[in-house]
Amino acid sequence: MKAMVNIIGAGLAGLSAAVTLAKAGIGCRLFSRQSSERAQSVMAEGGINAALDTMGEGDTTAEHFSDTMKGGVYLADPNAVRGLTEGAPDIVREFVRLGVPFQMKGETLVLRNFGGQKKKRTAYAKSSTGKMLMSALIDECRKYEARGLVMRFPHHDFLSLVTEGGAVTGCAIGDTFTGDRLVFSGPVILSAGGPAGLFSGHTTGTTQNTGDAAATAFFHGVRFANLEFIQYHPTTVGISGKRMLISEAARGEGGRLFIERNGRPWYFMEEKYPELKNLMPRDVVSREIYAVCRDPECGGQAYLDMTHLSDDTWRGKLSDLREECIHFLGIDPAAEHLPVEPGIHYFMGGIWVDERHRTNIKNLLAAGECACQYHGANRLGGNSLLGAVYGGKTAAETLSREILSAPGYMEGFEHAPAGEPTVLSGNERDPAFERRLTDILMEGLGIVRSEEGMSLCIERIEALLKEDGMSDRMKARASLGLAMAKSAIMRRESRGSHFRRDCPERDDENYKKTSTAVCIDGRVITEYLDIPPLRETV
Ligand SMILES: Cc1cc2nc3c(=O)[nH]c(=O)nc-3n(C[C@H](O)[C@H](O)[C@H](O)COP(=O)(O)OP(=O)(O)OC[C@H]3O[C@@H](n4cnc5c(N)ncnc54)[C@H](O)[C@@H]3O)c2cc1C
């Protein structure tokens, strides 16, 4: 069997890793539950950040760095964030070279405002940025596929890691069409997206990202970090058992939030935050909406007002968003106000990785939304597409450096991995169990949290874990949920997306730290790690 790198997940992070490996002449297999064309990355609307300073505002990568650190309330690894923000302009230029139809004015790339950032820094392709970036990388992958450097396996599920002596030697994969179980040797990059499926019905994310890949890795001893930080996007609308996103671009282009108070519209964000107004970071806007909707003087429903936007803005910048609202909601936002409420949108936490995207397990790397890197306690809009591309690239570069600098590295994988993979029992999904777990998690891990709510959540998950008939798969999901709740209760402060009614202040002295969680023999153990200091640049 030829040893190749195994990439689990073919969204932006997985494709970016595959292309980077292929460019270095290293072969890879790209496994995904669905084809790349259907990955969540395709849904991204608003844009990708890079301090390209094309708008004459004097933007710099140093400001992108400081906005990202500030947005994440200083929990992100500053060295990793510096790499990300300094690498961003070249990433966007490369996408321009690949033909992504970003918004242009003459020869100039147009950048837009996004939340938490004072300068225009977000490049976009109408409301289809994710789709356009994905198309460009899919085409790149096809080029390398023709040369035998990338092998794509859509409709293949990740079943488990294969390990020997504490190091990853391969992975077990299920062909979802034939039902065959296949074992492949080689190092593994996990890029299976965020665990949206743990919060089914409450998230804007795709339900194909069930969270099973993350749960399985967690159950096998992979360390996770910052799991308490779950981003609620302020403007979502409930539709068919999920939440439809009204992109931040709507506010970036002038959309205004309001609620009826004493019979008059109250533009609460503009009154409370005169500097950034409707473009405050997402956690702040979400909590404000949560609070005003519970204010007895107000009407109970917040709205987004875009009726004043010009025809040019609708046509040139928000046409897809308008079409989607008309098609899916039956509301034309150019003429009517959109009723909005916060919904789960992004997981800042995930698999713990170092600056080079290595996990705590040898030969296992992780990138994209399934990994915890760059966003700290809260992510800035436009930074996750960037983080997925840059993270996939960095993980692949780390591996290629090891592979190329250690002759024989890949030959070490050429024998079939020893032993049977420890595939979790009960691979069938159990919707009733998943629903119960989601309900418990939602009670403990909402926008506003409390000791009482989180303790109850932990108690109920622990009781669930003791029930008869729990398969390993169910236990893995419940254990990951438990790790989220335990990480949340351990942090006795409010920071970024983690807001506690009982500890409303930020406490840098005790909690300017990364929370981590591991599962050892079914027990979830949490602890804090120090954040690395910013190194001097050479
Ligand atoms: C509606 C919406 C709009 C967004 N807009 C923006 C934006 O404008 N700007 C921005 O920066 N970010 C945005 N985001 C966030 C951003 O899209 C994601 O964070 C990013 O695309 C994640 O990329 P990824 O490669 O990590 O994961 P994904 O694109 O989710 O890809 C995950 C891959 O893993 C595969 N997979 C999942 N589970 C398994 C399994 N068990 N076995 C095998 N394969 C599996 C999937 O099939 C898929 O191929 C948005 C998110 C949403 C939901």
Image: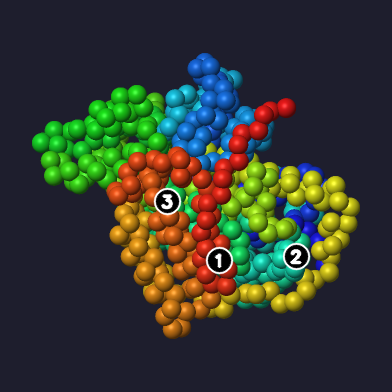
- In the displayed structure, 155 sits above or below 135; it is below
On residue 519, the disc is: 1
Left or right for 535, reference 408: left
On residue 169, the disc is: 2
Front tag of 1 and 3:
3
Q: CA distance from mark 3 to mark 2?
A: 35 Å
Horizontal and vertical percent for residue 380? 47, 37
Q: Residue furthest bottom?
A: 468
Q: Where the N terminus falls, by quadrant? A: bottom right
Camera sees residue 92? no
Looking at the picture, which amino acid does disc 3 mark? Arg
Horizontal and vertical percent for residue 429? 48, 73
On residue 350, the disc is: none
State the SS at label 2. strand
- In the displayed structure, 153 sits above or below 146; it is below
Q: CA distance from mark 1 to mark 3?
A: 19 Å
Left or right for 344, reference 63: left
On residue 491, the disc is: 3
Q: Would the CB of label 1 be found within 8 Å of ligand 1? A: no
State the SS at label 1. strand
- Residue drawn at point x = 49 percent, y = 30 percent: 67
Q: CA distance from mark 1 to mark 2?
A: 20 Å
- Residue drawn at point x = 68 percent, y = 28 percent: 537
Horizontal and vertical percent for residue 413? 81, 63
At label 2, counting other C-alpha atoms closer than 10 Å, the crowd grade (few under 14, some 14-19, many 20 or more) is many
Q: Residue furthest front?
A: 509
- Residue drawn at point x = 53 percent, y = 21 percent: 59
